[in-house]
Amino acid sequence: MDQAFAGDGFTVSRVVVGPLDNNAYLIRCNRTGKGILVDAADEPEALLQLVEGTAVLAVVTTHGHWDHHQAAKQTAATLGAPVLVHPLDAAMTDGSFNDLEMGSLRIGDVTATTLHTPGHTPGSSCIYLDGVVFTGDTLFPGGPGATRFEHSSFETIIESIVTHLFSLEDDTVVLPGHGEATTIGTERGQLQTWVDRGW
């Protein structure tokens, strides 16, 4: 477990779990001790250790691919919290997840913004707080997430990145679903390269 980001009134901790090295993140309000778990991917015991001492309000799933929610039901049941996913990706889960609404997401004293960023999957979503954005498999260091799936679209993921992510400040830290962090400014300058190569 490591601290991935410290913001104004909140901290972000990360643990890497599962065979695909998925990032699971805890966003925690410093004053209230309330938080949300982002992508309960695998290894529920590691996730419960990550959130120890935090009143978890919800388990938020960035998209419906199996590797991002394998431990969601078990972890959420232990914590007494709902699992949320965009309704367009509900069919990729077992149908027991609740709808992740787009807009404001309150975490104690801090407010996150949920963004619908389709392309990798129809319901892919990102979570933005001041200074940091959780991108799931929408944006990584060096390019967008894979769009080789039947339900994916390269043109759509590029539109999502340009519209919702590249509108953020250059120094916004990008915390992806796999791998290490980057910044919006670092990735913005590579856009034409991605478009030219087509992936």
Image (cartoon, rainbow, N blue to C red):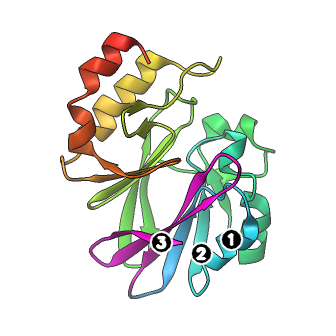
Distance from Cα at disc 3 to Cα at disc 1: 12 Å
Give the x, y percent position of residue 94.
Answer: 81, 45
Q: What element does badge 3 sit on?
A: strand
Identify the disc placed on residue 46. Answer: 1
Q: Are marks 3 and 2 in contact (CB under 8 Å)?
A: no
Q: Are marks 1 and 2 in contact (CB under 8 Å)?
A: yes
Residue 93, quarter of the rendered image? top right
Residue 156 in percent (x, y) is at 44, 21
Q: Quadrant of the C terminus?
A: top left
The amino acid type, in three-letter code, at marker 1 is Ala
Q: Is residue 147 above or below residue 2?
A: above
Q: CA distance from mark 1 to mark 2?
A: 6 Å
Count up the numbered dots.
3
- Residue on which disc 3 sits: 2
Q: Which mark is residue 50?
A: 2
Visible residue check, residue 23: yes
Q: Amino acid at mark 3?
A: Asp
Is-magenta flag for residue 17? yes
Among numbered discs 3 and 1, the one appearing first in the sequence:
3
